[in-house]
Amino acid sequence: MLTFPDVIRLKAVEDGRMIGFVAGDPRPRDGWGWIATIAVDPRFQRRGVGTALLHQCESKLGVPRARLTVRMSNNGAISLYEREGYQVIDVWRAYYNDGEDAIVMEKTL
Ligand SMILES: CC(C)(COP(=O)(O)OP(=O)(O)OC[C@H]1O[C@@H](n2cnc3c(N)ncnc32)[C@H](O)[C@@H]1OP(=O)(O)O)[C@@H](O)C(=O)NCCC(=O)NCCS
């Protein structure tokens, strides 16, 4: 993610320190891009940083739709994505290394 060309990489900074990041992978030929990773330092969560990172990444993807995968058990992240207009479009069984299922979500931008 840090080295691939065309990948969108954004960080959130407070007092000169990184407190969150997001990476987006545009796939213009598919008509969508992937929110590949997003995280906020636990000490700075629930302040809107994740939402701001998501919005910025969505706007820079330059494609009609954004997609992402999230662990079935990650209720906090799923809440955020639902609030931001993402809808479940698929479930990938045993997608993660530990066997957990992934929910695939999509939003029309
Ligand atoms: C998911 C994550 C990026 C959200 O970042 P954040 O800065 O806390 O998000 P925001 O403050 O913008 O949250 C916006 C809304 O999303 C929902 N939300 C976010 N985290 C939540 C949680 N832990 N539980 C329930 N709802 C949550 C809430 O509706 C929240 O609004 P509110 O605080 O007014 O109730 C952060 O929890 C994180 O880094 N988690 C660990 C990494 C991770 O799971 N990444 C996603 C992988 S797919």
Image: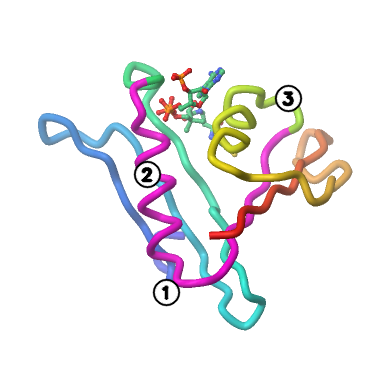
Residue name at image x 54 percent, y 40 percent: 84
- Binning the other alpha carbons within 10 Å of mark 2 as few (below 14), some (14 to 19) or many (20 upward) gives many
Q: Position of residue 10 (x, y in %)?
A: 32, 52
Residue 85 part of the magenta segment: no
User: Which label's residue is closer to the chain start, 2 or 1?
Assistant: 1
Q: Which residue is mark 2?
A: 53
SS for tag 3?
Answer: loop
Q: Looking at the picture, which amino acid does disc 3 mark? A: Ser
Residue name at image x 76 percent, y 40 percent: 97
User: Which label's residue is closer to the chain start, 3 or 2?
Assistant: 2
Tell me if 71 is positioned left or right of 94 in this view: left
Provide the residue span drawn in magenta. Answer: 47-71
Q: Looking at the picture, which amino acid does disc 2 mark? A: Leu
State whether residue 77 is above or below residue 11: above
Tell me if 17 is positioned left or right of 22 in this view: left
State whether residue 49 is above or below residue 63: above
Question: Mark on residue 6?
Answer: 1
Q: Which residue is mark 3?
A: 73
Q: Position of residue 24 (x, y in %)?
A: 48, 59
